[in-house]
Image (spheres, grey):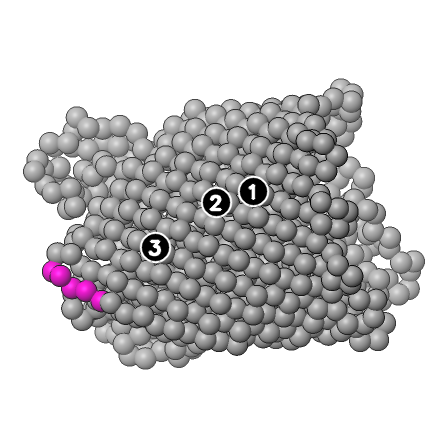
Amino acid sequence: MRRLRATLAGAGAISAIVTAWGATASAQGPEADIEDDDVILVTAQRRVQDIQDVPAAVTNLSQDELEANQVADVTDLQYLIPNISIAAGTGTANSARIFLRGVGEDESRGAVDPAVGIYIDGIYIGRQVGSLFDLVDVERIEVLRGPQGTLYGRNTNGGAIKLVSVRPQMENGGEVRTLIGNEGRVDLRATANLALGDNTAFRVTGFSRDRDGFWDFNPNGAAAQFGGEFGELKTRAVRASLLHNFTEDWRLLLSADYTNDLSDPIPDSAAPPNDADGDVFTIEPLPGTTCAAGTPITFQPLGCFGGYDNNTESQGYSANLEGVFGNFDFVSLTGYREMEDDLATRIGFPYFQQTTQDQFSQEFTLSSNFDGPFNFVGGVYYFTEDVLLETTFIFPFSVDTSTESYAIFAQGFLDVGDNGTLTVGGRYTDEEKELDAANLAFNLTRMEDISFDDFSYTLKYDHDFTEDVMGYVSYSTGFKAGGWSPDCFGAAACFLPVEEETLDSFEIGVKTDLLDGMLRFNATYFNNDYENLQIGATVPGLGFTRFNVDETSIQGFEFEWNLDLSDSFSVFGNLGLLDAEYTSVTQSQAGGLTNSGASCPGGVVTIECALDLELKNAPEYKGLVGAQYETPFANGILTVRGDVSFEDDSWSLVANGPPHALTDPGALLNGRIHYEPMDGNWFVAVWGQNLTNEEYWRAASANSFTVYASPPITYGVELGVEF
């Protein structure tokens, strides 16, 4: 940590120097006029703003940027956002394990809420299962880092990922795209947009993705004849929306989406050199293990279990009514979603899961458009969710939970002088949860209801030092309701409750457009102090469960930049730096964090040992550098783009062990060459990811040297036609 603290200090000095230089340069020279094409509009503060005017750490990825970076689903945001870590949940096909600024949630089972919220067109997604969404007709993605709540429906401590879909247009048109890649990958997407008169339009998109598996299954002994292949992708999705403009000021948007994901869960394999052939993409028994006939499926070891399977269905419906009356904008956002999944996988032992979930949310917001120095956004929010989780993990379990949450929130903006803005926001949340759960093997049960209430707030001040340099400082608090562990392996640790988690967050940032608009450079420092951080791990005498950690401190820097060296050549990148540590734990918490002392000298649990642990999924540095070159070619434009991503090693398990739980991706190389004719309506591109075929993994289980490998090299060609 000393090395990183020195780096953080140096980065702080650099940031201050750059900020001062930027302000001086703009003051001494002519003001830089940003072209319209360079203005990125976002709605991070419930108002349409240039992203450079938003006093918050937010990254926007447009449709063109998503395409150029080969973003097919949420996991592909991995290196495009500073200090983010994304992977599929351990042993799952589509559960999102998202960590932002060192904090996230990898427990996707019922009774546990996400730490980073995912929104589809403003509708919060209550479960991590099924939330690794394929991007179907997405206009842009906005990622907000830090606690959210005073402007957004559901409070989340880590941040928010907002997927914004393309709205129907008042014209007829459409598009067809296909992608063909290695390992039998075939993507198809078709969009039709129909104008149904002068004020009504309908838009529908269908999508499919197929790919063969990366993993060869080679059992031995009694299971030798059951070899095959795992890891295939098979997804079907459709999205439809209807927009009607009642008047110039009032409109209604109705949307519906459906996804059926039959993709295999990511299977487990033994990390080299512990396996027989040194290939992480071969699923085979450990040396000395023979698959025996008659072994119950719930105890089949690695390389003998061949039941990996998944079927996830999700669908959602929303109604968005927007209008203007006088000096006010009004929005009513209604959403209903449901999800079912049927999963068979291995997480140390064979694991079987069936989830049934439905949720309803209603939000009303009112924002002002006064000519004077003060404006505001306010709203009320209601959310209810029911989840039934039935699992078999050694023993059969049933977990039935429900949540009902009410909130009222408001945020005011006051101009201070000609160049400053003071922002004050608050949110009051009242939440109730109920649990009816049982270990069906031993008739161990817990029936309980708990309630939480919280007032969170934010204070911000931003100042335009020049037309091209804005700085801000903010202080925010956050809240994550408590709940229960979904595990019950004994009477002493049966669906144990966890307390609410709270956060105090300090942030200071600068956003600049320098060198007459050639360089865009944004920098942020943050310091987050958590109380009762919610953790899942093995606790001495209790087994695997969830618990709170008294105090945790995370600080870091985030940098994003884009430099246009000429009209045709640009370089870009981002860098995240993290210093994350537990600062106060009890002896019992130390036992859980260290896996009963497995991480400690001599196997003895001590508080000092726990305080020395690194937070999981929190690399000390992580970033990306890339370049793009455009040139005229064959009566069109040829665009060549490439990037290299890098990160420090980090642990995927709380206890910082065993050794195979260390994530070390190395440098990953991606590239894309895109051609589009000047007067045509089509494009063609060739692309590749992980071009050097690095072997790595982001998830592991402590048993059997088990890891869940990330994709090897992938490449292909893409063709699109508009009409």
| Distance from the alpha carbon under mark 1 to that under mark 3 | 23 Å
Answer above or below: position of 658 versus 599.
above
Find residue 307 and report its horizontal and vertical position in percent.
23, 37
Residue that lies at the very extreme toward the top in this rendered image = 634
Q: Quadrant of residue 179?
A: top right
Q: Earlier in the sequence, mark 1 or mark 2?
A: 1
Q: Earlier in the sequence, mark 1 or mark 3?
A: 1
Q: Nearer the viewer, residue 653 or 344?
A: 344
- Tag in front: 1 or 3: 1
Q: Which residue is mark 3?
A: 387
Find residue 364 and report its horizontal and vertical position in percent.
60, 61
Identify the main secondary structure in magenta. strand
From the viewer's perspective, tell me whether residue 600 is left or right of residue 120: left
Q: How many marks?
A: 3
| Distance from the alpha carbon under mark 1 to that under mark 2 | 8 Å
Q: Which residue is mark 2?
A: 316
337 falls in the magenta region: no
Dot 3: what SS?
strand
Find residue 579 and report its horizontal and vertical position in percent.
51, 68
Region rendered in magenta? 442-446
Q: Is residue 506 visible?
A: no
Residue at 78%, 24% (x, y): give it. 678
How dense is the environment of label 1, judged by Cα within 10 Å: few (below 14), some, or many (20 and up)?
Answer: many
Tell me which amino acid carries mark 2.
Gly
Tell me which amino acid carries mark 1.
Ser
Dot 2: what SS?
strand
How dense is the environment of label 2, judged by Cα within 10 Å: few (below 14), some, or many (20 and up)?
Answer: many
Q: Are marks 1 and 2 in contact (CB under 8 Å)?
A: yes
Q: Which residue is mark 1?
A: 255
Q: Nearer the viewer, residue 350 or 430?
A: 430
